Image (cartoon, rainbow, N blue to C red):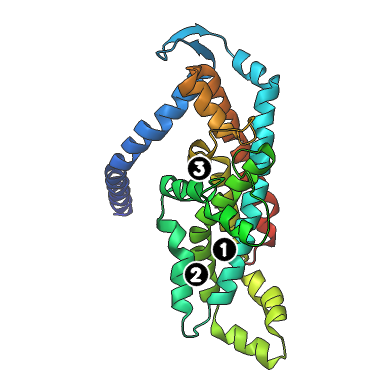
């Protein structure tokens, strides 16, 4: 009797597993077609030289990687990418955290400010870039117009190498602010009101309560935002392509734009694939490092 029940349980379990794979099959097929196959194809192409049509002309193994690690231009693009990440990620998180802290209460009129600060999330990269391209215009742009009203000379936002990366970073901070603000605001609103009341009873002021009580409870949200923001910053392309096209003098030539130029402008698909895989390895290493180091300081409720 026990043997019969055991075999029946095994058959039932196999049916459940088969049913699960049946429902997962469409998703797995999509992943295989649009994720796994392109990644494997990129690994293969990164070891080849291709003609302008993308056909393999010669198999060179790891020569593309050797050329990249000896290329000053590639390391320059890596340096520009790191500068871009440092300019955008901390600024976006700190600015969005400040706005979320000021507007998460239930005072009258806060909903209006929450709506305004969340607006960038519904604007596409292309639309936002065009808006800021007009703002950055050297003569007709509103930024230089307001600067002239306070006696400041016009700034060559996108044409001066010393200003171009900062200008693109400013636009990126505004563009990413909507998503980060909404996530942090949700995290703040998820903290029970009893904690704030207990802090008031204990005599803690707003700043002390935020730094010593609210901020530790917000660390899971901050950890998530940090990882997503760093990954997004390393993959930034649209605003750079529209605003500066990597210039002037390669001042905004980040790795993703270098990949685009090598693969789709110069038709060097082997080099482009190798650069993409190196970028993937860097992002993966940084993500693993963040989980290994920073997650220890995350306080889960």
Q: Is residue 167 above or below residue 188?
A: above
Image x and y of residue 211, in percent: 70, 74
Labels 1 and 3: the sequence-earlier one: 1
**What is the secondary structure assignment of the residue under circle 3?**
helix
Q: Which residue: 69% across, 22% down?
A: 69
Contact (CB < 8 A) between labels 2 and 1? Answer: yes
Specify which label sits upstream in the sequence, 2 or 1.
2
Residue 61, quarter of picture: top right
Q: Name the residue rendered at 62%, 13% in the picture.
A: 63
* Number of the label disc, if any, that sits on residue 186: 2
Q: Is residue 120 visible to the viewer in this orientation of the structure?
A: yes
The residue under the point 47% across, 46% down is: 129
Provide the residue designation for mark 1: 221
Instruction: Please state, as top left, top right, bottom left or bottom right, where the N terminus lies in the image.
Output: bottom left
The percent position of residue 50, horizontal first and vertical second, equals 47, 11
Q: Disc 3 or 2, which lies upstream in sequence? A: 2
Q: Quadrant of the C terminus?
A: bottom right
Separation of marks 2 and 1 at Cα, in angstroms: 9 Å
> Could you say whether the residue bearing mark 2 is in a helix, strand or loop?
helix
Left or right: residue 269 versus residue 4 is right
Task: Verify CB contact (< 8 Å) between mark 1 and mark 3.
Answer: no
Q: Nearer the viewer, residue 212 or 115?
A: 115
Which of the 4 image quarters holds residue 112?
bottom left
Q: Position of residue 39 (x, y in %)?
A: 46, 29
Above or below, 17 against 40 in this view is below
Q: Is residue 268 above or below residue 277?
A: above
- Give the residue pinned by disc 3: 239
Task: Report whether 291 appears left or right of 122.
Answer: right
* Distance CA(mark 3)–CA(mark 2): 27 Å
Q: Residues within 10 Å of mark 3 (few under 14, many from 20)?
A: many
| Residue 276 visible in the snapshot | no
CA gap, disc 1 and disc 3: 26 Å
């Amino acid at each position: 009797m026990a043997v019969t029940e055991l075999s029946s349980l095994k058959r039932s379990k196999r049916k459940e597993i088969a049913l699960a794979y049946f429902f997962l099959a469409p998703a797995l097929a999509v992943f295989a077609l649009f994720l796994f196959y392109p990644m494997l194809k990129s690994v293969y192409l990164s070891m080849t030289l291709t003609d302008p049509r993308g056909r393999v002309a010669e198999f060179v193994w790891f020569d593309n990687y050797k050329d990249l690690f000896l290329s000053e231009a590639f390391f320059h693009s890596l340096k520009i990418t790191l500068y871009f990440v440092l300019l955008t990620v901390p600024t976006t998180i700190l600015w969005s955290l400040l706005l979320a802290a000021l507007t998460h209460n239930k005072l009258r009129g806060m909903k209006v400010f929450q709506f305004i600060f969340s607006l960038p999330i519904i604007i596409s990269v292309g639309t936002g870039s065009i808006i800021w391209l007009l703002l950055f215009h050297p003569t007709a742009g509103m930024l230089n117009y307001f600067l002239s009203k306070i006696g400041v000379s016009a700034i060559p936002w996108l044409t001066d190498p010393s200003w171009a990366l900062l200008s693109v970073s400013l636009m990126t901070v505004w563009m990413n602010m909507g998503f980060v603000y909404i996530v942090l605001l949700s995290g703040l609103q998820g903290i029970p009101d009893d904690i704030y009341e207990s802090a008031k009873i204990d005599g803690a002021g707003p700043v002390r309560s935020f730094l010593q009580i609210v901020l530790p409870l917000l660390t899971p949200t901050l950890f998530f935002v940090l990882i997503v923001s760093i990954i997004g910053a390393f993959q930034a392309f649209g605003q750079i392509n529209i605003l500066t096209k990597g210039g002037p003098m390669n001042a905004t030539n980040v790795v993703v734009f270098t990949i685009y130029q090598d693969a789709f402008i110069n038709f060097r698909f082997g080099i482009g694939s190798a650069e993409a895989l190196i970028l993937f390895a860097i992002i993966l290493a940084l993500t693993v490092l963040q989980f290994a180091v920073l997650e220890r300081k995350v306080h889960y409720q």
